[in-house]
Image: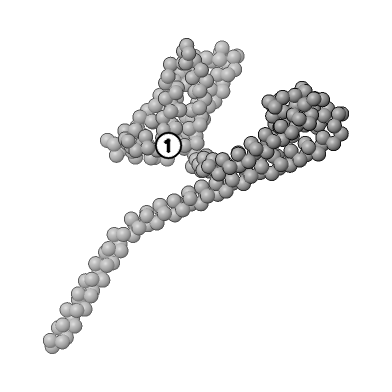
Amino acid sequence: MIARLSAILADPRTERFIMAAIIVNAVVLGLETSQSITAQFGPLLTTLDHILLWIFVVEIAGRIVVHRLAFFRDPWSLFDFAVVGIALVPASGALSVLRALRVLRILRLITIVPTLKRVVGGLLAALPGMGSIVLLFSLIYYVFAVMATKLFGADNPELFGTLGTSLFTLFTVMTLEGWVENVTTPVMEHHPYAWVFFITFIVSTTFMVLNLFIGVVVNAMQSEHEKAEADEREAEREMLHEETGPLAAEIRSLREEIAALRTEVARHQAAG
């Protein structure tokens, strides 16, 4: 029974069916955001949502039966379990916010598509290396905010009147969204050389520190890709070993028999 269930879950057709169900569920959740469509097809969408949910529940239950405790040791399986489990919690009263979390079921595509798993794995692997960069960025950001408050706060209090305001204003500058018209131009009315400060800040944060994040993420994803390739090669070697193992054993047996025959022939020749 368990062997048959395991074969069904491992079947590529089952994976494609679950993937199709996730995509259909995403479409249903999107349609439910339209008031006109909900008013016309609300009961049908609700029924489809419940059917898809129970498909996911049955699939998760089958995986628990097959893998047992190993299921709860796999982070991706726990992610699937949590995403489906949230949808089973009654979304009423104080828990009504959980109804909006049903959309998290779409993220199950990450656990099904191997390339998406590699991308997420690379991002998670990059988190430790990002710590020092975050610290460096925070120090630079804080220093520039204090300087801006002291330099421009008196003349432009709406932009740099307090440290918190300066932090928010510099964040908008860092995004390069309207920083010339909304920030630099008003400040330069009182401080003509303020452009030097803002260009230095942009180069230090947007063009330097943030690119370090990209470098760390790219390096982590490359390492994840190489690890996945190494695992695939190891799996291929193990499969090849399993396939050629009996043949190699048979060849060794034949060699031993041939050696024994040669020894027997040599003994007869010596006796004759």
| Disc 1 crowd, CA 10 A, few/some/many (<14, 14-19, 20+) | few
> Residue furthest toward the left?
271
- Residue at 27%, 35% in the rendered image: 1
Whether residue 106 is visible to the viewer of this picture, yes or no, is: yes
Q: In this rendered view, identify the residue nearer to me: 53 or 216.
A: 216
Left or right of 136? Residue 21 is left
Q: Identify whether 25 is placed above or below 223.
A: above
233 over 16 or under it: above or below: below
Q: Residue at x 46, y 18 (%)?
A: 47
Colouring of the image: one colour
Quarter of the figure with residue 150: top right
Q: Quadrant of the C terminus?
A: bottom left
**What residue is pinned by disc 1?**
75
| Camera sees residue 123 | no
**Which residue is farthest front?**
150
Q: Name the spot of residue 178 as percent of width and height, x first.
A: 77, 30
